[in-house]
Image (tube, rainbow, N blue to C red):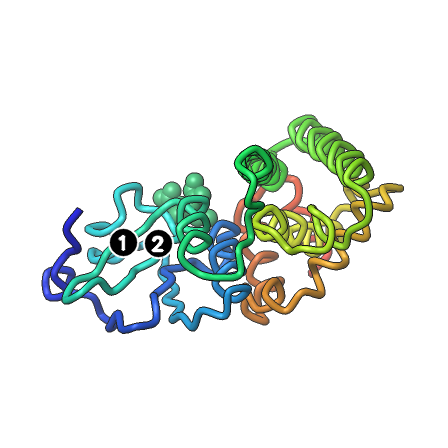
Amino acid sequence: MKPLPASATALPFTVGDAPVLVSHALCPYVQRASIVLAEKGVAFQRVDIDLAHKPDWFTALSPLGKTPMLLLREGDGVTALFESAVICDYLDETRAPALHPAAPLARARHRAWVEVASATLNTIWQLYTARDDAAFDTARRALRQRAVQLDAELAARGPGPWFAGAAFSLVDAAFAPVWRYFEVIDPIIDTGVFAELPQLAAWRDALARRGSVREAVRSDYPQRLREFIVRQGGVLGQRAQALAV
Ligand SMILES: N[C@@H](CCC(=O)N[C@@H](CS)C(=O)NCC(=O)O)C(=O)O
């Protein structure tokens, strides 16, 4: 694939030696890429866009019109990478330290758990867009089941603090944004998703304190997420609004 000439993309910023992470303030998939860049000590520029009004340059470069998109300088041109798992894998193949296991089978298993994190994000979406109590409870139960499953997986894997023990991995980067949602959701409606799951509690806690995880969102993230949830107008949004007045 030939990189696009920089002049053809009409970007409102310059892609220099540091890659550009095209982002949305609340996007959990962007957080994955941001965490991985930070873990690898790669300096990057973050450009936030409004997904409700996608800029033309973004639509031209992004086949699926989704964040994250990573823009990389290649010679005189710019190459756009999309899909968070692909971006993370590319970064892992090109920058140390490795965040995937070296053995192909263990690496494949880790990639599968990244998929589990994506599926969990879809269920969280169902939770905060649920229009009635039954839909909310269906999503809540599915998330509880997932949490129980992960707690058992962590117990089987042995001591942490990370998913794969002492080494932070791409699975950690994929799940950190998943658990972060509940820092905003649970104070609105206590979902009970994490009740009595000690391994999972310890993992969540370690992730929440990791520098790369903390820096993956701006300081106003909780407030923005709460406002976004209110705008959804679902069960959770209505409760959030009621609590705010
Ligand atoms: N599978 C994609 C999902 C990315 C995604 O869903 N991004 C959302 C924001 S969090 C998006 O850009 N939505 C805009 C749209 O679908 O039009 C990935 O892993 O990168």
149 or 17: nearer the eye?
Answer: 17
Q: Secondary structure at mark 2?
A: strand
Q: Which residue is at a point 56% across and 49% down the rendered structure image?
A: 170
Residue matched to label 2: 69
The kind of residue tagged 2 is Met
**Dividing the picture into quarters, in which one does residue 43 lie?**
bottom left
- Residue 143 against residue 48 in the figure, above or below: above
Q: Where is residue 4 shown, x and y percent of the image? A: 14, 56
Kindly check if marks 1 and 2 are in contact, taking CB atoms under 8 A apart as contact. Answer: yes
Residue 223 falls left or right of residue 150: left
**Dividing the picture into quarters, in which one does residue 74 lie?**
bottom left
Residue 56 disc label: none
Q: Quadrant of the C terminus?
A: bottom right
- Residue 192 against residue 99 in the figure, above or below: above
The kind of residue tagged 1 is Ala
Mark 1 neighbour density, 10 Å: few (under 14) some (14–19) many (20 or more): many
Residue 80 falls left or right of residue 127: left
Q: Where is residue 172 shown, x and y percent of the image? A: 63, 50
Nearer-N-terminus badge (1/2): 2
Q: Where is residue 10 shown, x and y percent of the image? A: 15, 64
Residue matched to label 1: 80
Q: Which residue is at a point 54% across and 69% down the rendered structure image?
A: 218
5 or 106: nearer the eye?
Answer: 106
- Residue 94 against residue 157 in the figure, above or below: below
Q: Which residue is at a point 43% across and 58% down the rendered structure image?
A: 24
Mark pair 1, 2: CA separation: 6 Å
Look at the numbered disc 1 and say if its residue's Cβ is closer than 8 Å to ligand 1.
no
Q: Where is residue 12 shown, x and y percent of the image? A: 22, 70
123 or 135: nearer the eye?
Answer: 123
> Ligand 1 falls in which quarter?
top left
